[in-house]
Each structure stands twice: as structure tokens, then as C-alpha cells.
Image (spheres, rainbow, N blue to C red):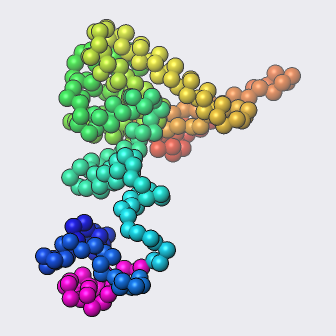
Amino acid sequence: MRDPWLRGSANRWMPSPQPAGVYQLSVKDLLHENYKAWNIAKVRNLFSEDVVERILETPLVSSVCEDKVVCEEERNGCYSVKSGYKLAMCYIIGSDKYHVAGNWNGIWKAQAPHKARHLLWRLCRGCLPTRYRLLEGCAVARDSWCAVGLSSVLHNDVYQQTNAMDRIFAVCSNESSDTVGRVAVLLWCIWHNRNDNVQMPRQIGRYAFDAWNDWYSVHKLQSNSVSGTTEAYLVRWEKSALGWVKCNVDVAFVSGSGRTSMGLCFRDNSGQFMAGMTQ
């Protein structure tokens, strides 16, 4: 028997040493000629005891006309490139050799174009040789962070890890998805600038700022259109960056009375209430 056909433990192909004459046989040669059942005497004569047990445990379905190779990853049994890729990725992700621990969900949840999120993934997988220079390794990068209004993220003491991967994962864990998206777009613009016409730092920062705002506006518009609702967009509270305190203010006006009231609420970066005031 030239092809593997018998499953063992852990769903692996089972090795079965065979005499020279067995190599030319097929599975059908192990069945009785006049009805579909294992020829137990023949099977025991050709294989070892553990292999015999596996063979005899294999059920025989009367409706199957002939054997054929099927792909168990597909419902129709036909192999496709997609199923092969999925199987290979499951092997890679489950392997300690290729697995990299980190907040990968934070990268893919970032509010940014896919090309920017993909760049973050490449940075954290070590696929980009200039990954450190994108953060702060040169004056152009530092000035670009300031121009786009993200200098507080760049200089935050919490994000001063020695490598780009740890810094990106820290930002993904502690900042909002919008901020992570702005960081992703800025890094993409810096990287794109290094591979295209060189621009001034402020131009890079401004381009990143405009690019993210344009993408965010269109993305939100499309999301609202798909939902098919006319309800007003609800603004959800988002926590502040580490080391910062967020103050939310609300004001109410009583029509015709000339009276006004206001309220303040201070919360830390974990969302815990710190202080408040009403007047």
C-alpha cells in the first residue's frame, strides 16, 4: 500500500511496516470479494497486531462506491488554496517556534486603514528593518510625532520600552482604538516618506493627521449607512492615557428661565471616579 490511509493517535497517519507483497495491494484487496467486510484472516496475516486493530475498527459504509482522497477542512471534501492556507496558519500559530506573544487584537482593532494596521503587524513581527527609526530614531520621526499631536504618546514614560514591538503592544493596551489608529497612520506615513519623495517633518505629520481624519470620517459614514438606522451617533466615554486625568463637563440650560446648571467629573486612566462638582 503506497499511500497512507490509516489514522492513529492524535489524528496522525499510522505507520504500518509491510511485507514486500503488500506494497502493491489496495484497501479493497483486504475485503471479501462477494460482500463488503474485512477479511480478518488476511488482515491478521499481513499486519502487526496494533495495525490490525485499527483496520478492523474502521467502519465500512455500504453506500460508498469507491475510495477517494478528500480534504477534511472543506465541507465538500475538495481541497482549496484557502483551506491549505488556513491549515498552515493554524500550524504556525500553534507552534512555539513561530508564535509571538503580544496584544495582536489591539493592532487589528485599531481605527485605521488596513495598510496601517498591517504595518504595525510587520513591525511587531520583525519584518521591517527600520522599525526603531519609525518611532524616534531620527529628528524627522520625532518632529512628525509632534506635528500630528502625538508627542504625549511618544514621550510617555510607560512607552519607553527598548524595542518597537513592546512599545506598540503597550500603546495598544493602554490607549483608545482611535489613538492607536492615529499612531498606525503616522508610522505608515513616516515609512512611506522614507521610500518616496522626502518631505519635511511637519508635512508628514500634517499628512498623517489629514489622512486619518479623512479615513475616520468615511469609515464612520459607511458604518452608519450599513446599519440602516437614523439614531444619533452615541459618543462613548474613553479612558485617558496612563498618568493623565480626564475631566468630563456637562451643561444644561432651562429654556425661558435664564437658569443654567453644570457638572464636572474627574476620572483616572482606569475609569475610577476621583472627584466631581455640580453647580
| Camera-nearest residue between 6 and 215 | 6
- Which part of the image, by quadrant, shows the N terminus? bottom left
Q: Residue at x 51, y 33 (%)?
A: 246
Q: Quadrant of residue 74?
A: bottom left
Q: Position of residue 110 (x, y in %)?
A: 44, 35
Res 279 visible: no
| Camera-nearest residue between 107 and 46 | 46
Query: 214 above or below 178?
Result: above
- The residue segment tinted magenta is 39-60
Q: Residue at x 36, y 79 (%)?
A: 58
Res 109 visible: yes
| Camera-nearest residue between 237 and 12 | 12
Position of residue 150 in the picture relative to residue 94 (left or right): right
Q: Quadrant of residue 191?
A: top left
Query: 263 above or below 214?
Result: below
Query: 194 above or below 135?
Result: above
